[in-house]
Image (spheres, helix red, strand yellow):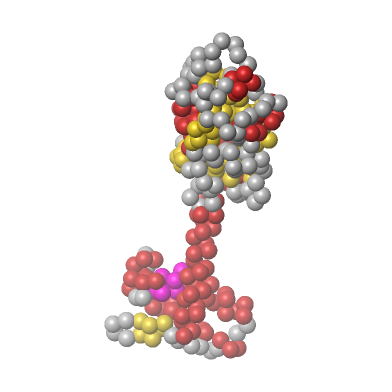
């Protein structure tokens, strides 16, 4: 019989590889019978194949007693490799599953965009044949975790390592409840009135997206008293809700304000200023090749323009 020390590396791999699922099941179940049950075969088939492998290799993989089996030193090494091999294939098939043309798309969206734009448009997604599971999360998605298919990000973009598709360029404009600003006073006069409260997005003031009163006034050629009365919020939609409630003037941006303006809840009170930041649809390079991604992108572009 050709022993393991006489066999080439390729011969050894050829002998062991087909039995990786069997070795992995035995190692995980610590039992031939339970491994056979998990694999859907008879216990005798498992025992026979392991015995044949041991004879071909020239060493024992398991110490057998009437009550239990224990991997030998050789067995532990090969079982560990078998488990790793099976896990790799499981992961590969999980990734292949994402290439299906049907099924739910898991989309992560920041809270403000979800409340002001995505949720009001979800009905049209169903009409377009899309099933979307919405994850409302203000933190960037870690796509390596495999829990999300795609996300919408607001920023300068594109994003290294991800497939980035530009959805919509953005602009900012001050908004307030209709009638909050008396008459036809210009924004500069309004900003000069210290009794007028400015509503700020605290996150936008510091996250590098230029969603701030400082950026707006600099681009619009307006002076801003940094010591004036202001209220700060951690979400852009809360800023807009405060403006709707007559609490002051807030900055609104593309996709967040169109609905409220159309319904008469808000009105622009100053010029519109383009932003460097924009809305991006991001995902893994693998998911970008699927039909589900193409359908998602087409729908988002349709409802954003």
Q: Report the predominant secondary structure element of the magenta stretch.
A: helix
Residue drawn 54% across and 47% down? 140
Q: Position of residue 194 (x, y in %)?
A: 55, 24
Q: Is residue 121 left or right of residue 169?
A: left
Q: Quadrant of residue 245?
A: top left
Question: The C terminus is located in which quarter?
Answer: top right
Q: Nearer the viewer, residue 271 or 230?
A: 230
Write the start and end of the magenta stretch as one range: 21-27
Residue drawn 28% across and 82% down? 67
Q: Is residue 305 above or below residue 102?
A: above
Q: Position of residue 185 (x, y in %)?
A: 60, 14
Residue drawn 52% across and 46% down? 139
Residue drawn 56% across and 10% down? 183
Q: Nearer the viewer, residue 23 or 162?
A: 162
Q: Is residue 217 visible?
A: yes
Residue 286 forms part of the magenta stretch: no
Q: Is residue 95 above or below residue 277?
A: below
Q: Is residue 284 above or below residue 5?
A: above
Residue that sits furthest to the left in the current view: 67
Residue 22 forms part of the magenta stretch: yes
Q: Position of residue 77 (x, y in %)?
A: 50, 80
């Amino acid at each position: 019989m050709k022993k393991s020390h006489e066999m080439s590396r390729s011969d050894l791999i050829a002998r062991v590889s087909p039995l990786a699922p069997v070795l992995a099941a035995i190692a995980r179940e610590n039992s031939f019978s339970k491994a056979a049950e998990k694999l859907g075969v008879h216990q005798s088939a498992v025992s026979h194949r392991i015995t044949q492998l041991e004879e071909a290799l020239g060493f024992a993989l398991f110490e057998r007693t009437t009550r239990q089996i224990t991997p030998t030193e050789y067995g532990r090494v090969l079982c560990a490799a078998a488990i790793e091999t099976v896990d790799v294939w499981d992961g590969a098939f999980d990734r292949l599953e994402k290439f299906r043309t049907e099924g739910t798309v898991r989309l992560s969206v920041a809270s403000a965009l979800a409340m002001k734009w995505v949720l009001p448009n979800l009905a049209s997604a169903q009409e377009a044949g899309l099933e979307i599971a919405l994850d409302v999360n203000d933190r960037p998605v870690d796509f390596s975790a495999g829990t999300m298919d795609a996300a919408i990000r607001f920023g300068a973009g594109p994003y290294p390592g991800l497939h980035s598709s530009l959805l919509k360029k953005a602009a900012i404009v001050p908004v307030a409840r209709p009638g909050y600003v008396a008459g036809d006073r210009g924004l500069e006069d309004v900003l000069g009135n210290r009794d007028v409260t400015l509503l700020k997005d605290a996150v936008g003031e510091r996250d590098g997206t230029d969603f701030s009163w400082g950026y707006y006034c600099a681009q619009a050629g307006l002076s801003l008293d940094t010591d004036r009365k202001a209220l700060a919020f951690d979400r852009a939609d809360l800023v807009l809700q405060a403006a709707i409630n007559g609490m002051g003037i807030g900055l609104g941006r593309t996709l967040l304000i169109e609905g409220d303006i159309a319904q008469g809840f808000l009105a622009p009170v100053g010029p519109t200023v383009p932003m460097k930041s924009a809305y991006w649809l991001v995902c893994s390079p693998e998911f970008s090749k699927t039909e589900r991604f193409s359908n998602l992108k087409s729908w988002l572009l349709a409802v954003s323009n």
